Image: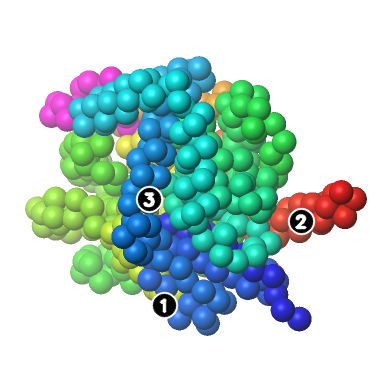
Amino acid sequence: MEKKKILIIAPYGMTLRQLILNNTFWGYLVMNYEIHMKTPIEISNALELGIGRVIQTRSSGLIKKILARLFFHLLALFKNYSLVDFYISNNLGEHLVFRLNNVIQAKTMFWKYLVMCLLAPVKNLLYSLLKSLSVVLSEVRNSKYEFILITHISESYSELEALSANRLNIPVITLTLGMDNYRHGPLIYTPDLMLLWGREHEFEFKNWHQEKYMSMSAVKCEIVGNLVHDAYLQNVGCEIVNGFIDGGNNVQYDGYILVPAMIEAVIPGQTRLVQSLIEYLKDRSLNMLIIVRVLPGTDIEMWENFESENEGLVLIQEPQGGSYDKRGKRNNFKLEQELLEVKLFAELLSNAKLVVNLYPTTVILDAYLFDTPCILPLFDWRDQKCLAEHPYSKVVFAKMFSHPLNSQYNMVLNWSSLYKALDDVLLDEKIDHYIGRGLYDYVCHKSRDGSVGLRACDAIENFLAKSRLLYSYA
């Protein structure tokens, strides 16, 4: 029996990780559908993975390139125009401030907003043009697809295909890649089914999107959990991380602190934080290593120099596969490499004595999956004395989650509380206060049970069954 076709849009290696490395969910898709994948990533052995066709994202031919450029310019104008109002109306001013604090982003937002204000009288006409262009440029018009699967709700190529699918009455199903995805502004297309992590996403979508935009009123939402957490639970151990540490230093340690790095241009002063941790460990005579997990291809020279200056105290770990990249630094996906990367990351988190993060990112939630304690010292690390609280730390933290449970995140706002938190975890083993179990359950639902993939399969099957039933009555 010939399988029905589906189109998956996977713009980053990270989105491929969510799909392919969840054995249950990917197995369901491969077993039941002929999979077409639109992605800029080079996927090794795509046919063996069950991908029937890989489609490149870039348009070919001069006319299509011109139309694509027009489409993406229009798309950027529409998204930017609605972004300011979205942030203000939903009391998300810290996101607006964060962008306006960057001179280049502020200028871009200003000019795009100004242009769209001037074009306001023909806004509806331009939106119709945008939808028409999406059909001309999209892949969905070339095959009869059962549904399309969006792996990042606000990525441009995903929006192109989803707009076209809306126009052609093809169901749009979305996965949620990150915890802040519903803060990126109003959706420009209308999903039919959205698979959410937990109640946090449900609150944000219903309050900031569904209740304010008529086009979202009929969207179905299902809470399933975070797909990648199934993969972490299936691949956790200690042998790879021990080998990594032994290979980097000929020293025996009593444990390690994990520090996930951010982009230095966005969160400056990160080496100062790590230097402060080094000073603390020396002051307390603790024989511990600091592992800095850097972003792929990002600030590598800075961190390598810092590692050389602190040999035996700091070890840099850079993911080599595409599973932890969403900035185009790793344009390949090889299953064996990605499984190794996922296993190493799961082991880094589960075996760490402590995770110290500069910003409340998903790494904190990943650590909470293994009940690993976390602290967030949100100082302004550009201040060499490190006495100043970061000017946006309180408001960013307070708004990072939409529920009072965010108090379980432990922000450290002065030196004495930083040292107390480190002492609690590393000396006195008072870790319960630094493990946000309630917050994890609120944001990630039942992801600890290893059945996220199964819930996602059931959600899609139930949705399609109801859709077919309604179609038969129509």
Give the residue type that dot 3 points to.
Leu
The way the protein has been coloured in the rendering is rainbow
Residue at the disc numbered 2: 464
Q: Secondary structure at mark 3?
A: helix
What residue sits right under mark 3 in the picture? 67
Horizontal side of 54 relative to 320 (left or right) equals: right
The quadrant holding residue 141 is bottom right
In primary-sequence order, the first of circles 3 and 1 is 1
The residue under the point 47% across, 71% down is 54
Q: Is residue 120 above or below residue 219?
A: above
Residue 449 position in % (x across, y down)? 67, 55
Please state which of residues 317 and 201 is positioned toward the viewer in this rendering.
201
At 41% from the left edge and 66% from the top edge, which residue is drawn?
A: 56
Closer to the camera: disc 3 or disc 1?
Answer: 3
In the picture, measured across the screen, residue 397 lies left or right of residue 404, that is left
Q: Are marks 3 and 1 in contact (CB under 8 Å)?
A: no
- Give the extent of the magenta segment: 377-394
Magenta stretch: residue 392 in it? yes
At x 69%, y 70%, the residue is 4
- Can you identify the residue that label 1 sits on? 44
